[in-house]
Image (spheres, grey):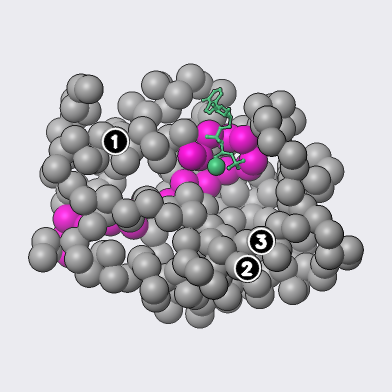
Amino acid sequence: MKDRESVALITLEGVEGAGKSTLADGLEDLLLRCGHRVLRCREPGGTSLGEAIRSAVLDPGHGEVSAWSELFLMLAARAQLVREVIEPALGRGEIVICDRFLDASTAYQGAGRALGVDRVRELNRLATGGRWPDLTLLLDLDPAEGRGRQTEAPDRMEQEDLDFHRRVREGYLRIAREEPQRVEVLDARRPPPELLSVGWEALRRRCPGLGLRAEPPVA
Ligand SMILES: Nc1ncnc2c1ncn2[C@@H]1O[C@H](COP(=O)(O)OP(=O)(O)OP(=O)(O)O)[C@@H](O)[C@H]1O
Ligand SMILES: [Mg+2]
C-alpha cells in the first residue's frame, strides 16, 4: 500500500455544464499515464444505494420536494459513498476523483435553497465522518452559459430558475474564499485543454505527496 501522502481525494465542483466531467476525464487520463491508480465516482450516486437516491432526488415527478428532504437525501448518499467506496479506495492507495462532493450540498442546499452554508457544512462533517477533500477544483461559470452547453433533458435541479443557480454559484465562491488552502477556482470559460493544464498544476502544487511533474505526460 502507498503511504498516506501519495493518496488524495480530489473533487470537482461547479454549476451544471461547467465542465466537471470533462476535466475529470482529462485528469484521470493524465494520472493513469503517470502510473497512479485512480478511482472515479460521482455524487449523488457511486453506490447502489446512492444511485437509487440519485434517481429519486433528481426525478422531476415528485411534486414539491422540501429543501430539507433534498439535503438529507444528498447526505445519505454521501455517507454511503464515503464508507463503501472512498475510504476503501484511499486505503488501497488510490487517487479518488469525485465529480461533485460535499461542497455541492453547501452550495445547492445551503446557499441555493437558503438552508444556511455553515449549518450544511457541519452536517457534511457528520455525513463524511470528517473526510474532507485534499483539493477541490471549482469550475466557476455563469449558470446561463452552463445551461447553454447542456444537451440532455434537464433534471429536477437543472429545471430551477437562473436565480437559484446564481445563488449556487455565489455559494461555491464563498466556500472558495473561506477555504482557499483547499479550493482552487478555475475560470470555466477557458477551453478544456487550458483547464486541464491549470488543474494539473493545482494538483501538482497542492498535493506534493503525489510527486507529479510540472510537465503533464503526453499522449
Ligand atoms: N471548457 C469548456 N468550454 C466549452 N465547452 C465545454 C468545456 N468543458 C466542457 N464543455 C462542453 O460542455 C458540455 C458540458 O460539459 P461537462 O459534461 O463536462 O459538464 P459538467 O459540469 O459535468 O455538467 P453536469 O453538471 O451536467 O454534469 C459538454 O458538451 C462539454 O463537451
Ligand atoms: Mg457531469
Quarter of the N terminus within the rendering: bottom left
Provide the secondary structure element on which disc 3 rests: helix
Q: Is residue 121 visible?
A: no
Q: Earlier in the sequence, mark 1 or mark 2?
A: 1
Q: Which residue is mark 1?
A: 29
Structural crowding at the residue carrying mark 1, measured as other residues with C-alpha within 10 Å and reported as few (<14), some (14–19) or many (≥20): some
| Percent of width and height locating residue 112 | 74, 55
Provide the secondary structure element on which disc 2 rests: helix
Q: Is residue 10 magenta?
A: yes
Count the marks: how many? 3
Q: Which residue is mark 3?
A: 55
Q: Residue at position x 45%, y 24% from top?
A: 192
Structural crowding at the residue carrying mark 3, measured as other residues with C-alpha within 10 Å and reported as few (<14), some (14–19) or many (≥20): few
Tell me which segment is drawn in magenta.
Answer: 4-21
Q: Which residue is mark 2?
A: 53
| Percent of width and height locating residue 195 | 42, 27
- Whether tag 2 and tag 3 are in contact, CB under 8 A, the answer is yes
Residues under labels 1 and 2: Cα distance? 29 Å
